[in-house]
Each structure stands twice: as structure tokens, then as C-alpha cells.
């Protein structure tokens, strides 16, 4: 099985070396504290994690253990109704 990394941000980047660490955290995909991301285990990701190891917690997991993403709700429900175009259908009784 392919390995994945479960990466959780556990500390804020506010008081760290802001430019270096913030750019690495945003390129990893973090937007807020305590967010969890699942990334492929490769040398590029490992190198980025080495730069910010004091800000994140990393766990190696199998690919089958990654939760399936649930699509976000739109906030409204679309109800399909009979669509009317304003045109009348021909009756076939043309004289």
C-alpha cells in the first residue's frame, strides 16, 4: 500500500519566522490552526515538514485509512419542477 502522511497544524505561525514558515505552511495547504491534511509521502513534502516540524504533528498512515471527503452543502436545496418555456405545444388540430 502507498503511504500517506496525516499532517495536523498544532501551533500558530504568528510568532515564528514569519516569511519562511508562512510560505511553507501555505504551500502545504494550511489555512487555520488545528487543520488536518493528508499528503503523499515523498521527499518534497518531507523537506517542507522538516522546516516547520515545530508547528505540525505528522503521522504515517496507509492510503486506505484516509477518510473520504464529504461534499459541502450549498446551503440551499434545488427543487426540480415542471419547466415551462412560455411556448404552447401544438395540438395537431391545425385547419
Image (spheres, rainbow, N blue to C red):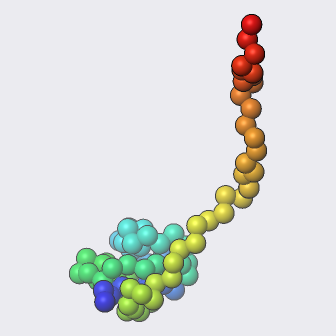
Residue 38: x %, y % from top left: 43, 80
Name the residue rendered at 51%, 78% in the picture.
Answer: 68
Front residue of this view, candidates 83 and 70: 83
Is residue 74 toward the left or the right of residue 17 in the image?
right
Total marks placed: 0
Is residue 15 toward the left or the right of residue 47 in the image?
right
Q: Is residue 50 visible?
A: no
- Say if 20 sits above or below 94 in the image: below
Name the residue rendered at 46%, 84% in the picture.
Answer: 66
Front residue of this view, candidates 32 and 6: 6
Q: Is residue 75 visible?
A: yes
Query: Hey, which quadrant is residue 40 in on the image?
Result: bottom left
- Say if 25 sits above or below 52 in the image: above
Quadrant showing the N terminus: bottom left
Residue 63: x %, y % from top left: 38, 85
Name the residue rendered at 42%, 87% in the picture.
Answer: 64
Quadrant showing the C terminus: top right
- Say if 74 sits above or below 62 in the image: above
Residue 60: x %, y % from top left: 37, 92
Front residue of this view, candidates 80 and 91: 91
Is residue 39 toward the left or the right of residue 74 in the image?
left
| Furthest residue in direction top, as rendered | 95
Query: Hey, which quadrant is residue 43 in on the image?
Result: bottom left
Query: Hey, which quadrant is residue 2 in on the image?
Result: bottom left
Amino acid at each position: 500500500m502507498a503511504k500517506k502522511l496525516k499532517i495536523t497544524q498544532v501551533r500558530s505561525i504568528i510568532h515564528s519566522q514569519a516569511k519562511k514558515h508562512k510560505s511553507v505552511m501555505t504551500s502545504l495547504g494550511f489555512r487555520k490552526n488545528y487543520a488536518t491534511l493528508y499528503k503523499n509521502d515523498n521527499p518534497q513534502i518531507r523537506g517542507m515538514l522538516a522546516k516547520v516540524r515545530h508547528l505540525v504533528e505528522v503521522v504515517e498512515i496507509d492510503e486506505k485509512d484516509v477518510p473520504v471527503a464529504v461534499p459541502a452543502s450549498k446551503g440551499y436545496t434545488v427543487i426540480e419542477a415542471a419547466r415551462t418555456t412560455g411556448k404552447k405545444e401544438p395540438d395537431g388540430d391545425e385547419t
